[in-house]
Amino acid sequence: MWAVALLVFREVLEAALIVSVVAAATRGVHRRGWFVGGGIALGVSGAVLVALSAGLLASAFSGVGQELFNATVLLAAVLMIGWHVLWMASHGRELARQMQALGSAVQSGASSLTLLLVVVAIAVLREGSEIVLFLYGMRAGGADHLWAGLAIGVIAGSALGLALYAGLLRIPMRHFFGFTNGMLSLLAAGLASSAARYLIQANLLPAWSPQLWDSSWLLDNGSLLGQTAHILVGYDARPSGMQLTVYASTLLALWLGARLVTRAAQPPRRQASSPESESAAQPRSELMQQAQPGRTS
Amino acid sequence: MKRSLPFVLAALLPTSALAADAPTYTLVLKNHRYQPSTLHIPAHSRIKLELINQDPSPEEFESNDFPAEKIVMPNSRMSLFIGPLKPGRYNFYGDFHQPTAQGTLVVE
């Protein structure tokens, strides 16, 4: 039972960490609970589908179907997280100001919420399909207390994810979206580096000096902390040159993109007399007035 | 990612030729154990590892010491590329049957 619980726990934890960061990053957005929940549900169904077609996937593209699938799905997640990071770079400050003023959920939905639903679904799908295959094998082998192990693993993994989420919510609102945007950027860079690892394994990408360094004496890939760091910031004890290149260029692209977007978003706000900014400011002050009586009564 | 995509695509082309040069080493998975459990491979060269799963359940070949993560379905085979690695001992395992599916890669 404990072997089952441990494996399920590790897989659930990986997905839960990603879901937590996404859930925190969409804090205050209207109906985001539905999107996060929908993403998880979609991911679970996808996991069963992927597990069912694992044989097909394994033999596809002359044996590198698995690597291509993983790399594609990971890169799709990177693009979607990247889009959200850039969107937040231009809207984050506004969102934080509104939430500070209202002390409650913002009514306007984030345009990138659907993209993040897909990111959640992808995270759940990848880890979930491994759990399904594992349980299938365990069942065939006649293991005891399969469902108890599954339940313990899911609960323990989700609990750690929730703990991370609760911790993130304690960050002051002023720094909140800056922080979650940073976390999302590191997450995206780590996922891109994982995608590169799959492509190297399939011999579709060169490794470019396979072990740049070895920090496994400090933090091993197999340890719980190492695994957590791997998901959250893309930590690898023995990264290849290619992985580091992909990691760094993803971070750089996001950083430069965010700077460009922020700069483009700023000029109209400064000119208070322009009609555009006035019309944008109007609904906000109305919202604030509406909110005040609600809070005092 | 968009920025690095042309580089990635450009890098793809010359490496396809590498695949044919890599020597193949074979591991058999039976009763959730690797046979042989110690595999000797040359240092500083890229190898192709073929894994034949004779068990009726899926397994995931994985390592924390070198990049490798691939599922092998019941009664089937898969292959992946490893290295080039520096001399040393590298452990690998089967993620789905960790108590028994353990092995070592001796790079020399």
Image: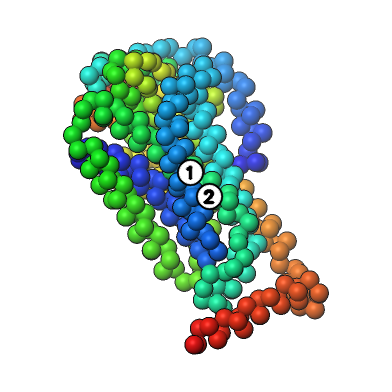
Q: Chain of mark 2?
A: A
- Near mark 2 (Cα within 10 A), the count class, few <14, some 14-19 or many ≥20, is many
* Amino acid residing under circle 1: Leu
Image check: A33 left or right of A112? left
Quadrant in which residue B99 is drawn: top left
Q: Chain of mark 1?
A: A
Q: Position of residue A234 (x, y in %)?
A: 45, 45
**Closer-to-camera residue (B106/A283):** A283
Image check: A157 left or right of A102? left
Image check: A238 left or right of A176? left
Determine whether A167 is above or below A132 in the image.
below
Q: Position of residue B48 (x, y in %)?
A: 42, 17
Q: Which residue is mark 1?
A: A42
Q: Which residue is mark 2?
A: A117
Query: Given this view, does label 1 or label 2 mark the residue nearer the observer?
Result: 1
**Colour scheme used in the picture?**
rainbow
Q: Position of residue A264 (x, y in %)?
A: 73, 61
Per the image, label 2 sits on a secondary structure element best described as helix
Name which residue lies at 55% across and 73% down. A99
Q: Is residue A183 visible?
A: no
Per the image, label 1 sits on a secondary structure element best described as helix
Q: Are marks 1 and 2 in contact (CB under 8 Å)?
A: yes
Name which residue lies at 27% across and 45% down. A151
Determine whether A275 is above or below A220 in the image.
below
Q: Is residue A17 visible?
A: yes
N-term-proximal mark, 1 vs 2: 1
* Amino acid residing under circle 2: Leu
